Image (spheres, rainbow, N blue to C red):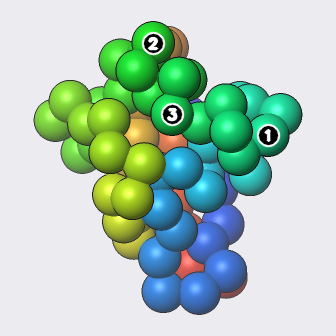
């Protein structure tokens, strides 16, 4: 499990994908979300605007990320 620190109240799924280095530019976020199964707290999710809060979990492939507040 990997930990990701949120600066502020939340981060969107699209912002997280870019900040985590899973894509190199913001323009690649939408195709990445369409091509990969992403689970948000166990539910399938593909909306780049989905808000992620501290203590949430996101799974992308075999990688599971847990979020903490800065």
For disc 2, the neighbor class at 10 Å (few under 14, some 14 to 19, many from 20) is few
Residue 19 in view, yes or no? yes
Percent of width and height locating residue 17: 62, 42
Q: Secondary structure at mark 3?
A: helix
Q: Whole-Å distance between the Cαs marked 3 and 1?
A: 10 Å
Q: Earlier in the sequence, mark 1 or mark 2?
A: 1
Percent of width and height locating residue 21: 79, 37
In the picture, measured across the screen, residue 46 lies left or right of residue 42, that is right
Q: Secondary structure at mark 1?
A: loop
In the figure, 19 relative to 32: above or below? Answer: below
Q: Quadrant of the C terminus?
A: bottom right
Q: Residue furthest right?
A: 24
For disc 3, the neighbor class at 10 Å (few under 14, some 14 to 19, many from 20) is some
Q: Which mark is residue 25?
A: 1
Q: Earlier in the sequence, mark 3 or mark 2?
A: 3
CB atoms at circles 3 and 2 under 8 Å apart? no
Q: Which residue is mark 2?
A: 35
Q: Which residue is mark 3?
A: 30
Q: Residue at x 51, y 33 (%)?
A: 30
- Residue nearest the viewer, comparing 45 with 25: 25
Percent of width and height locating residue 46: 32, 35
């Amino acid at each position: 499990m990997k930990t990701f620190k949120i600066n502020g109240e939340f981060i969107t799924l699209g912002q997280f994908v870019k900040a985590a280095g899973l894509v190199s530019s913001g323009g690649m976020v939408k195709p990445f979300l369409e091509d990969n199964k992403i689970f948000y707290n166990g539910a399938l999710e593909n909306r780049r605007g989905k808000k992620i809060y501290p203590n949430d979990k996101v799974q992308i492939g075999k990688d599971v990320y847990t979020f903490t507040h800065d």
